[in-house]
Image (spheres, helix red, strand yellow):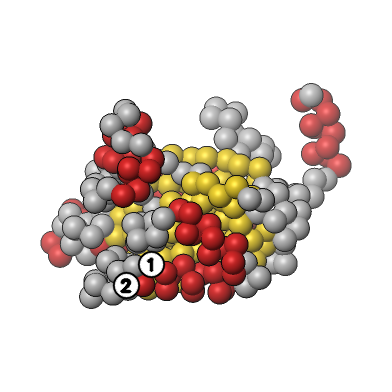
Amino acid sequence: MSLKGKIDFTELTDTGRVREHNEDAIGSNPDIGLMVLADGMGGYQAGEVASGIAVQIVSELAKEGAEREEREDVDPHSGLMRQSIVLRDAVYRANKIIYQTAQSQTHCEGMGTTIVACMFYDNKVSIAHVGDSRAYRLRGGNFEQITMDHSLLQELVDRGFYSHEEAQRSTNRNYVTRALGVEPTVEVEVSEFEVDPGDIYLLCSDGLPDMVEDEDIHLTINTFNASLDMVGQQLVDLANDQGGRDNVSVMLAQVNDSFAAKKGLLVKIANMFRS
């Protein structure tokens, strides 16, 4: 089913105030509820090539996967929803292609990218991510990061060396411990969440949270949420007003209504026998 009218989407990417090139890439497909954001590694060559490949591959494979008819909604081996498997496998494939390109093209040697991708379906959202590009959710008055950074700083927080507040002020925030294209294989983290009408989901590259604290991101969304486009523009402007030291990309989805999947009679009967 198309999600047009059920969810509003907006996206924006900006070079920032310091960088000469934009190594972020974004892509969306509102019909299948897909958003993909990748941040080419700043210290690597051809980061924009890596992020572009990541968004293209994940977008194409996610669309193919969404159009396939499957007998099972849940993968019996992992317990993950089919859409989560589609996203995860698409990111695996993107990693393989980026790595092979880096090995075969001299000018692409050493390139890499982070990625965060989400797909909405059946009143749920699946999120796949690698690196420190993030997903946030605003539900009611609660604004929270729903992905965990794959970074050295996050590992130090997990081990108790930093508090969350100290980590937000740290200058050593950009050492990622996972990225696409750096190794032949990569571990992709996948999460699944129930979705409620009124939820707002934000995907962003680290150019936003490195410049703007979570409390100010929350305040901006609350202040301008009558227009999702305005929220995106205000977040980018805020990052640039704070220095804009990196490229900044934001993608937002606002849930307007339920989008439960329609199930046929045979599916209902099968579910009765499973229970």
Element assignment for label 2: loop
Query: Is label 1 in contact with label 2 (beta carbons under 8 Å)?
Result: yes
What's the distance in space between the residues labelled 1 and 2, CA to CA? 8 Å
Whether residue 242 is situated above or below residue 127 in the rendered picture: below
The quarter of the image holding the N terminus is bottom right
Q: Amino acid at mark 1?
A: Ala
Q: Residue at x 75, y 58 (%)?
A: 257
Q: Position of residue 262 (x, y in %)?
A: 79, 50
Instruction: Assess disc 1: are there few (<14), some (14-19) or many (≥20) residues with their C-alpha within 10 Å of its C-alpha.
Output: many
Q: Position of residue 261 (x, y in %)?
A: 75, 49
Q: Is residue 19 left or right of residue 83?
A: left
Please name whichever residue, 229 or 56, is drawn nearer the observer in this view of the structure. 229
Q: Residue at x 47, y 59 (%)?
A: 216
Please name whichever residue, 22 or 264, is drawn nearer the observer in this view of the structure. 22
Whether residue 270 is situated above or below residue 215 in the rendered picture: above
Q: Position of residue 169 (x, y in %)?
A: 31, 49
Quadrant for residue 271, please give it. Answer: top right
Q: From the image, tell me which residue sits under label 2.
A: 16
Element assignment for label 1: helix
Q: Residue at x 76, y 53 (%)?
A: 258
Instruction: Name the front one of labels 1 and 2.
Output: 1
Q: Is residue 233 left or right of residue 51?
A: right
Q: Amino acid at mark 2?
A: Gly
Q: Residue at x 46, y 44 (%)?
A: 147
Instruction: Assess disc 2: are there few (<14), some (14-19) or many (≥20) residues with their C-alpha within 10 Å of its C-alpha.
Output: many
Quadrant for residue 32, please give it. Answer: bottom right
**Counting residues from the N terminus, which is met first, the one under dot 1 or under dot 2?**
2
Q: Is residue 84 left or right of residue 207?
A: right
Residue 86 visible somewhere in the drawing = no
- How many numbered callouts? 2
Q: Position of residue 146 (x, y in %)?
A: 51, 44
Q: From the image, tell me which residue sits under label 1.
A: 239
